[in-house]
Image (cartoon, helix red, strand yellow):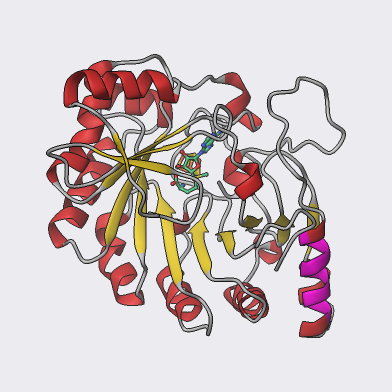
């Protein structure tokens, strides 16, 4: 599906729940947020229907996200069913890793194409400060378990906040030294609770890495669904990546839309632009009508985000990433 600016939309990030077992400071307030009522959360059948209609029209890649996707029962089964849809080339998942050890084999059995674990620091106390939960040990166990089993590609995503700590950056990239696990640094986005934080810049992280580990060499091969730029390092099996939506804007190449857990097709992180699909799913509409709605939603996709501008935009997104599906 081509949007109004000629971008081919072939990737959707689907939030299967807005609930989460962590409370990351840049993603959710301490007290949590008011959860979507169960009856207003998309059923797996509804998600599958949307995927089928989109796949008939060019969708190729699906990311399962949340909230924390592994807290929703049966998520591996959903992945398996999406994988079976004709035209879908990859289904991946991003998780905070707390439940990874126990769910790993279900995910692998479902045919998931990669697992991304979000981990911002290797310092246990800092982890607790960021996530407001004491789950560091479980996450590291999950990562180690996945590395040992090595049945599916594993990636680590880090949103570095709270100052540049060289030791920490180096311990995070150690995951890529030891095994073919890519480690990617993501700039914090000024959305919801994220507005209170500033990322350490890509340039600063690169300097630390190059000072200690040698030159980062740009990697031509495409790894992943979207905008991350990857580098190789001598002596490292995995790659180092950067996803810097603010300092290295990539909207002109944006190939994605998002589906929130309550059925809103969201076309840009910063704006509400999109369409509520619920009426098309629950009011007896045909697939042709659903496709029309999807096309309308995609036609609303803005040309670019405007995080660098300070004005108060009318249709700006005020929800947290956990509610949008990051
Ligand atoms: N709970 C899962 C996890 O943490 O991977 C999936 C959902 S989470 C919203 C997806 C990703 O969004 C995580 O890597 C998280 O670090 C990132 N994220 C959340 N809030 C963000 C923000 N304000 N800016 C940038 N990334 C953010
Ligand atoms: Fe939960 Fe992921 Fe948000 Fe952290 S980033 S609060 S783990 S949804």
Please give the name of the residue rendered at 18% of the width and 54% of the height, measured from the top-left corner.
147
Please give the name of the residue rendered at 21% of the width and 66% of the height, measured from the top-left corner.
151
Front-lying residue, 241 or 164: 241
Please give the name of the residue rendered at 70% of the width and 46% of the height, measured from the top-left corner.
268
Left-right relation of 63 to 166: right
Q: Quadrant of residue 314?
A: top right
Please give the name of the residue rendered at 63% of the width and 39% of the height, measured from the top-left corner.
33
Residue 132 in view of the camera: no
Front-lying residue, 289 or 9: 9
Residue ranking furthest to the right: 314
Predominant SS of the magenta segment: helix
Residue 287 in view of the camera: yes
Q: Residue 58: x percent and y percent?
A: 62, 74
Q: Residue 194: x percent and y percent?
A: 58, 28
Query: What span is colored magenta in the figure?
Result: 289-298
Front-lying residue, 198 or 138: 198
Q: Residue 80: x percent and y percent?
A: 42, 78
Residue 49 colored in magenta in the image: no
* Looking at the image, residue 272 lies above or below residue 150: above
Placement of the N terminus among the 4 image quadrants:
bottom right
* Looking at the image, residue 23 lies above or below residue 103: above
Left-right relation of 39 to 250: right
* Looking at the image, residue 69 lies above or below residue 109: above
């Amino acid at each position: 599906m081509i949007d109004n600016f000629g971008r081919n939309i072939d990737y959707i990030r689907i939030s299967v729940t807005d609930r989460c077992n962590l409370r990351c400071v840049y993603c959710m307030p301490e007290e949590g947020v008011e959860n979507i009522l169960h009856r207003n959360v998309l059923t797996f059948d509804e998600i599958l229907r949307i995927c089928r209609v989109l796949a008939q029209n060019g969708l190729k890649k699906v990311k399962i996200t949340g909230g924390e996707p592994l807290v929703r029962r049966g998520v591996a089964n959903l992945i398996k069913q999406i994988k079976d849809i004709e035209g879908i080339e990859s289904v991946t998942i991003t998780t905070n890793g707390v439940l990874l050890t126990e769910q790993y084999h279900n995910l692998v059995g479902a045919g998931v194409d990669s697992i991304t674990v979000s981990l911002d620091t290797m310092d246990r106390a800092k982890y607790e400060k960021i996530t407001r939960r004491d789950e560091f040990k479980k996450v590291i166990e999950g990562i180690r378990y996945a590395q040992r089993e090595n049945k599916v590609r594993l990636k680590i995503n880090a949103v570095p906040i709270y100052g540049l700590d060289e030791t920490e950056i180096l311990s995070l990239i150690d995951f890529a030294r030891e095994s073919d696990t890519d480690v990617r640094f993501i700039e914090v986005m000024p959305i919801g609770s994220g507005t209170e934080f500033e990322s350490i810049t890509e340039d600063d992280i690169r300097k630390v890495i190059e000072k200690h580990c040698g030159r980062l060499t740009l990697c031509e091969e495409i790894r992943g669904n979207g905008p991350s730029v990857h580098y190789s390092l001598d002596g490292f099996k995995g790659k180092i990546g950067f996803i810097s939506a603010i300092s290295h804007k990539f909207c002109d190449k944006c190939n994605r839309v998002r589906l929130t857990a309550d059925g809103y097709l969201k076309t840009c992180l910063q704006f509400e632009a999109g369409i509520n699909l619920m009426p098309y799913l629950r009011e007896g509409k045909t697939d042709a009508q659903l496709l029309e709605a999807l096309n309308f939603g995609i036609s609303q996709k803005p040309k670019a985000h405007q995080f660098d501008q300070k004005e108060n935009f009318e249709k700006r997104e005020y929800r947290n990433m956990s509610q949008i599906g990051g």
